[in-house]
């Protein structure tokens, strides 16, 4: 139990996907304009990342390892995650329309997100079992959401600042992201 | 040379990888194909059709999150087919046709900033050096201009406009009549509530919102309405009325004769065709 908790804490803070691994920067810049959309995207990522970690972990252990095809893991994971998201989308549209409309556009957006693929590949690299993989996937997504919401708050404030013209928009957002990443660097080196 | 190299490649792992990936791909593809049949949901075609008609600027003037959200609301009957102010009568007609409704009269509207107190004409209380945003400036004693009802010109409406139709010129927001679509986003954004929507045909307007007495208005603004009633007396159709020290034009009665525009001693009745402040 302690091990699981430490794994979660590590994935959320120490090895935060955005601020220390620099994965999933595209949605991080794209949907962090408003806190509302950031939370929507965060929940979609949590949903997909947990499920894809589970699926890829099973496929790796029982298919790729068994047939000695470990070197195919990256390309197989891409295919699996993409079709899984497609499947979930159809499934939700038919059976849970309320969740479908809540996740909305964000669900297909994260089909080819590198954070989702990254979580799957990291699980393999670290040799995690099924339960650990699912926990890691979920915790990494929580860390992703945390980063997104924090940054959305910063950007909401930034809208009202008198930024020099050449820095307006993405440049100043990237600078702010770098500053937050430096703050998160304070967690690095803590081995849990 | 080529044949030697080809012979040196061990083909077995390549073929295995190829076959395995092809098998996984085919399996997942088949699964998705089956799923798309099993979980097929009939979508209302009208939503897509209406979305096609709408301008697609996602200005938010209608009160919905964007053009897509408005299209869904119209199909569900929550919004009227004339809800898109930005699209104007043309879009309203198309939407009504899709929804099978009779065409409704659509009155085009334009936004108007009811103030002409540009810098140099109105007195300042203090030098504002905070965030460039009216909502922020208004918290500091209601803005830097003395006039309690005037435009403070820090550009909240400019940021709200999706069509680049409103700009702050010399400290006062001015609407570009050509670009304005009448979506109403700036009206909602203005913390002073001095932007209003007027019928498109309105080509004269009073550029002041001050309801102070004439002498008070005169004390802080060179271009404020002093309620002298010259416009009211000269209007042949009785469209101009002075209430609470401020001239108002009734667009139902106005014949666009332009007499009030010429007679106003403060030169604050403007013609929309000119679009410019008479500075």
Image (cartoon, coloured by chain):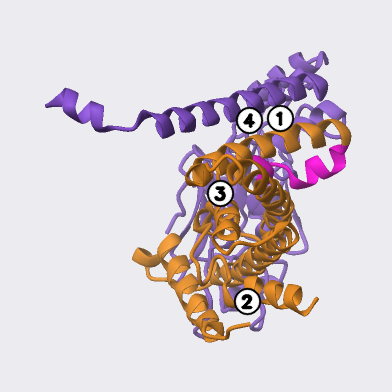
Residue corresponding to mark 1: B107
Q: From which residue to which does the magenta span run?
A: A96-108
- The chain letter under disc 1 is B
Dots 1 and 3 on the same chain: no
Is residue A55 visible in this depiction of the protein? yes
Q: Is A104 drawn above or below residue B48 in the view shown?
A: below
Q: Earlier in the sequence, mark 4 or mark 1?
A: 4
Dots 4 and 1 on the same chain: yes
| Residue B21, x across and y down, in percent | 53, 31
Separation of residues labelled 1 and 3 (CA atoms): 46 Å
Res A13 label: 2
Residue corresponding to mark 4: B87
Q: Nearer the viewer, mark 1 or mark 3?
A: 3
Apparent colour of chain B = purple
| Residue B265, x across and y down, in percent | 54, 58
Is residue B120 visible in this depiction of the protein? no
The quarter holding residue B190 reads bottom right
User: Could you tell me which quadrant the N terminus of chain A lies in?
Assistant: bottom right
Separation of residues labelled 4 and 1 (CA atoms): 11 Å
Look at the image and say whether residue A101 sits in the magenta stretch. Answer: yes
Res A113 label: 3
User: At 75% across and 20% down in the image, what residue appears?
Assistant: B34
- The chain letter under disc 3 is A
| Residue A90, x across and y down, in percent | 76, 31
Separation of residues labelled 4 and 3 (CA atoms): 36 Å
Apparent colour of chain A = orange
Q: Nearer the viewer, mark 1 or mark 2?
A: 2
Separation of residues labelled 4 and 2 (CA atoms): 48 Å
Q: Secondary structure at mark 4?
A: loop
């Amino acid at each position: 139990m302690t091990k699981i908790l430490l794994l979660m804490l590590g994935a959320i803070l120490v090895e935060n996907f955005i601020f220390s691994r620099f994965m999933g920067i595209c949605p991080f810049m794209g949907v962090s304009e408003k806190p509302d959309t950031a939370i929507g995207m965060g929940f979609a990522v949590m949903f997909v990342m947990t499920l894809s970690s589970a699926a890829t972990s099973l496929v790796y252990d029982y298919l790729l390892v068994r047939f000695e095809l470990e070197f195919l893991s990256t390309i197989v994971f891409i295919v699996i995650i993409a079709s899984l998201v497609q499947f979930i989308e159809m499934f939700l549209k038919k059976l849970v329309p309320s969740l479908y409309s809540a996740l909305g556009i964000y669900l297909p957006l994260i089909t080819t997100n590198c954070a989702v693929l990254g979580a799957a590949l990291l699980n393999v690299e670290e040799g995690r079992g099924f339960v650990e993989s699912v926990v890691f996937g979920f915790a990494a997504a929580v860390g992703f959401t945390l980063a997104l919401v924090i940054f959305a708050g910063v950007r909401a404030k930034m809208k009202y600042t008198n930024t020099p013209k050449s820095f307006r928009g993405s440049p100043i957002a990237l600078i702010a992201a770098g500053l937050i990443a430096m703050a998160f660097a304070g967690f690095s080196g803590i081995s849990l | 040379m080529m044949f030697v190299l080809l012979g040196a490649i061990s083909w077995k792992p390549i073929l295995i990888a190829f076959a395995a990936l092809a098998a996984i791909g085919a399996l997942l593809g088949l699964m998705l194909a089956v799923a798309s049949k099993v979980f097929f949901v009939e979508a209302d075609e009208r939503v897509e059709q209406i979305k096609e008609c709408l301008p697609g600027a996602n200005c938010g003037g209608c009160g919905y999150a964007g053009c897509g959200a408005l299209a869904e609301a119209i199909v569900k009957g929550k919004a009227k087919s004339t809800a898109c102010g930005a699209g104007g009568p043309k879009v309203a007609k198309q939407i009504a046709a899709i929804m099978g409704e009779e065409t409704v009269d659509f009155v085009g509207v334009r936004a108007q900033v009811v103030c002409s107190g540009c810098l140099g004409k109105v007195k300042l209380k203090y030098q504002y050096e905070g965030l460039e945003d009216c909502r922020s400036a208004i918290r500091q004693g209601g803005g830097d201009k003395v006039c309690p009802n005037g435009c403070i010109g820090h550009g909240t409406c400019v940021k709200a406009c999706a069509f680049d139709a409103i700009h702050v010129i010399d400290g006062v927001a001015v609407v570009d009549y050509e670009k304005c679509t009448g979506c109403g986003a700036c009206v909602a954004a203005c913390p002073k509530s001095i932007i209003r929507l007027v019928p498109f045909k309105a080509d004269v307007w009073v550029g002041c919102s001050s309801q102070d007495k004439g002498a008070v208005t005169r004390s802080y603004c060179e271009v404020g309405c002093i309620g002298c009633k010259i416009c009211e007396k000269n209007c042949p159709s009785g469209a101009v009325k002075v209430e609470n020290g401020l001239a108002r034009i009734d667009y139902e009665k106005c014949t666009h004769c332009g007499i009030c525009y010429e007679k106003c001693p403060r030169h604050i009745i403007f013609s929309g065709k000119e679009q410019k402040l008479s500075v």
